[in-house]
Amino acid sequence: MKKLISFTVNRPLPVLLFLLVITVIMFTGIPKLRLEPSSEALMPKDSPEYLYNMRMKRIFGDSRLFMLTLIEPDNKDLFTKESFELLNELVEEVEEFRVFNLDREQKRLETVCSLASVTFFDPEEPESVNKSKNEDISDEMIDSLLMGDAEVSNEYFDVFDLEAPLPADVFIKPIRPRRDYQFENYKAITRGELENALDHASNRQLTTVLLRTGLNNANASHRFSEEEYRLIVSEFETIFLLKSAEAVKLFMNPVSGEDIVGTKNSLTPTDLIEEDEYGTRKLPETKEEFAIYKQRLFENPVFKNTIYSTDKSGEIDSLAMTIQLQVIREADTANKYLMDVITKYNGRGLKMLPVGVPVFERYIQDYMARDMKLFLPLALLVVILTFLLNFRMFRGVILPTLSVILAIIWTMGLMGHIGIPVTMVVNILPTILVAVGSSYSIHLLNQFLHDRNEIHGSRIKQNLIRSMTRISVTVLLAALTTFIGFSTLSINQVVSLKHFGIFSAIGTVFACAISFMLIPPVLSLFPGKESNKASGIQNAYLRSAIERGGRFATNHAAAVIAVSLAIAIGGIIGLTHINIESSPITQFHDDSYVVTSDSHVSRKLDGTVTFNLMIDTGKDGGVKDPEFLKNIDETAEWIVNRKNRDRFNLLASYSFADVIKRMNKAMNAEDDSFYKIPGKQSVIEDYIMLYSGEDRNSSGIPDTMERFVAPHYRVANIIIKTGTYNGRIYSTKVLLESVDNINSYMKSRKYFNGMQYTIAGQAINYAVLNRLVAWGQVVTISLTLIIIFAIIFLLFKDIRAALISLIPISFSIIVVYGTMGFLDIPLDLPKSIIAAITIGIGIDDTIHMLKTIRTQMAEGMPLRNAILASYGEAGMAIVYTSIALILGFSVLMLSQFKVIFYFGWLVAMNMTATTIAALFILPAAAYLFKVNFGLEKKEKTAPDTNLQATILTKNKAIQRG
Amino acid sequence: MKTANRILISIAAIATLTVSPLISQESADAIMKKNDGIPSGQSFKREMTLLVIKQGVTEKKEFTGFSKKQGRSRRSLMQFTHPTEMGFLVWDNPGEESQQWIKLSGGRVRRIASTDKGKPWMNSHFYNDDVSEKYIEDYKYELIGGESVNGTPCYKIRSVKKGTGATYSKTEVYIGKEDYLTYRVDYFEGGRHVKTLTLTRYENILNIPTARMLTMERADGKGKSVLYIKSIRYNISIDDRELTREALAK
């Protein structure tokens, strides 16, 4: 270590240049960072639940792509001409994303551009982007099949075979690449001019664009600057590309939504509100027309709580719509845009409440971005203030701050270069690095200030090297233990915790290395002047208070230990009450939009989150078997029976049986008695053939049925909806119990014997995370404690020292987790890293204290005096670094997320507990158990007269205060 | 117009004509008139295979087709023999909307609603509308260029249906410059190219140019349907009663 410090002190400029180069390289990685709000990013990629869900998504669609919106009247009657006109506007705007009209969109885009003299170049082969070569079957094979030389042999993707390779994601692509628009000849135009040039539908789109670009308050005479118009054109281009990929796959709504209508001769999907010959919707206007419209809704039982919801008297009091996106790479962008379109219609007589996984993820992403912007500057400010308080000198502030900033740039930049996504847990990494990284600089600078007058002799560099080397072991040890604490998280199965563990450990190494590469070279270049001021940390009151506490701890060691033990026992009792929770809803504050809307919409529409029960009939066409359909119908009904509703929040279920029942009723003059599965398979096959629903993706299954049945009609899917029920959230614990319950039912139902089935989905992902969090917690804590014990033992060669070193961290973990149990604060993903942080950071105080006591004892001081003497040297540093840590972590309490608020609060509480334990419980235990740090033999065998004199001197000094 | 609009009905009823070389000056209407004038036979019976390929799943269907022309009207019947026993009946008259019926496997006959003309025919990439006769006077044509299709120089003609209720916003038809046969049709919905029909393996049967293979492929490459004529007999005697709803229901 000395060699390294010598190098940095003797060659400061090359070292600083090296730091600069690495920082620039790492900085280029930061723009590559990507916020990832999905639960999938957290899942271990080899867990069966994850694998089943991935397979299920390929066949039945991704629940992440579903957005549900409750439509309520805003102090008005919902069934008025005005409300439906507004609703129709919204539906038409969304419909443009479902059915792409190239001519219309091209004209719209060209108008926006030509009006302001914006030019562009079209790619040479516009449609080649979207063309995906159908390589499933060769021309030779087609010939063989046509000539009868070969039989059709379709390969079946076995969703239940987890070893089978997953089919690649088939992303629907836009019809052309993104254009590069040229603004050289830009001619500024006003909003009014733009509006006049666009037709009604284009103006509708323009209002959304202006809302998204923050230009919605511009009046008609507002002349767009080039920068503003670039934003507008960019948005129009994005919308064009999304529409060209027909981003919306399914759009169930009360206006253009389809019902199955049967006549004597046909069975067709028909719009709930018909269009005239010019394509204009004939919206209901009179009471009578609305009555007919409502009757139409009532005729399809599936519409209840999907298209409409009723009050207690059975009257429709709200409507609803569901949007399902295509599998497109830009799904997040499309979701955001569509959410903006929907919410744009708020406050105009209608109240829109979008919910679902896309809404969760949108909020998570927005909140993460806001947190990121808030945490870092605030944490830095807090730490700067701590530095200022600590050192009261310019370098004392600038150097540690700079070293922390560099550590963050290096760590986050590295993540960006490697492509590690920023999840909610990873998002707090910069704040943690600020808190953790600052302590190494504090130690180095504190030592420099301590030795300042000594350094400013004739051989400045040599003295600086000596001073820095002296503190290096403490710093390295602190970094090592923190590194170990964080590293143990990397064995976690939850991917984001693993990432957090790896990169917080790397960040710790960076912070430590940067401190050594920055502070000694700068001090070598600018050593400053000698000072008559007291060096290092000074605060007489604080010092006096700590020392008084120390005396109390040693004078009443047994009592201190007894009280601590009692508190710990209380903590253990609380710990047994702790709940593990991974439900996304618990991440948000109770008064947030996500929680309040989810609760309300869940009540009105029977849940907001789905998962799936997938059943393999074992044969092609098996789903069309009436017996099978009757069985899945009964199963779907059982799932949402009163008991399951009350116990497990299972609120709604849908299956292919519902589609067939609806068809049967439609084909039998809407007679309610025919809302059942027909007895003959041939009738079911006829219905399917007759139902000429769109198959826009050429899957072989009509788009509206794809959620329920797989190609070949072999595998069926029951969609199960859950959500907040009677004020009780769909906790992951309840979800796991409901999965067990459904599995037991399936086992007990003889018909399904021999059939494969599984339960998976987004909601199940959350539940699985619970198990992983619990497992990770136990392993992380055990492993870290064992490693820390080993390190301390190696350091002091004393088993008692190693044992008592675990007291402060164990004490604080028990107290904090016990508090969580008593206050019903659940253990979740972010909180599961608290233990590792506590051990990794908290052990620094313990080591610092024990090492100082040992040093005093090595100089010949008796244990009690050594303990008391240590307060002056180590106690103050411990208090100051702890203050920096506590305040740094407290910044997290300003988070938009409830879980991060509690995380910040609990870590701050943990740091406080660790500090108190290190300062008072640890010395009390050391004194009570007569820990001598392996120095006993030496003291007994080698009494030294000089040493005796030192003890006397130090004792007198201590007695003087 | 004997282009894709005759996919199933007048599939190969196209005569070989010796064409004058004055092609460069011809108008779109003249070209289409020559295309329309190619004989297609008064009646025919054929055995056909339909392959439907959708995202890796291939379905093979076999059927027998009968068709008879009376003046400018045409009636056609397709009876599926494998794997289903469904059937399809089409009645086309000039100036009227095509009438279509489907026989379900249970034997019931249902009429195809006019709103379903743009829906898939027998779960394939052809639409119900594609299997009906098209009349030249119902469309506006515009010559928009020339292009080769599999080495055959062709006129490229844009065709747009007059009035309302078109299944496609437009089609682009490739007519051979030498023989006036249809080689390819691009279909557009809302201005976007959605499907392409290619007619290949032309043979002269009783001097009627017959494309034995018709391939309808999605423009995005995600699936196609192939129709293949295994055998065909032109100008045979077909009783009118064989082309009725009753015959379909048999």
Image (cartoon, coloured by chain):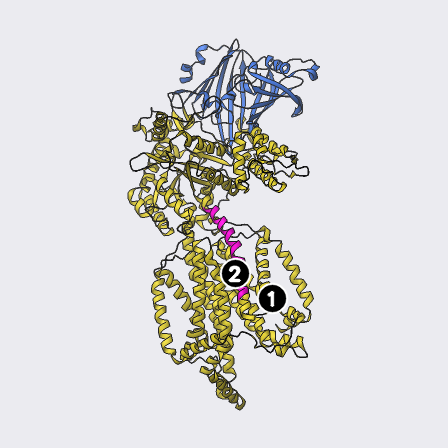
Vertical placement of residue A318 versus A860, above or below: above
Left or right of residue A672, residue B6 in this image: right
Q: Colour of chain A?
A: yellow
Give the residue at mark 2.
A379
Q: Chain B is drawn in which colour?
A: blue
Left or right of residue A943, residue A532 in this image: right
For disc 1, the chain is: A
Give the residue at mark 1.
A399
For disc 2, the chain is: A
Considering the whole magenta stretch, tell me its main secondary structure.
Answer: helix
- Which quadrant would residue A66 be assigned to in this image? top left
Vertical placement of residue B25 versus A1, above or below: above
Q: Do the residues labelled 2 and 1 touch (CB within 8 Å)?
A: no
Query: For numbered disc 1, what is the local secondary structure?
Result: helix
Taking the view exactly as shown, the residue that stands out farthest to the bottom is A945
Asked if the magenta segment contains residue A639, the reply would be: no
Assess disc 1: are there few (<14), some (14-19) or many (≥20) residues with their C-alpha within 10 Å of its C-alpha: many
Relative image position of residue A325 (x, y in whole percent): 48, 38
Q: What stretch is highlighted in magenta?
A: A360-385
Q: How many labels does the image show?
A: 2
Say what amino acid the circle numbered 2 marks. Answer: Ala
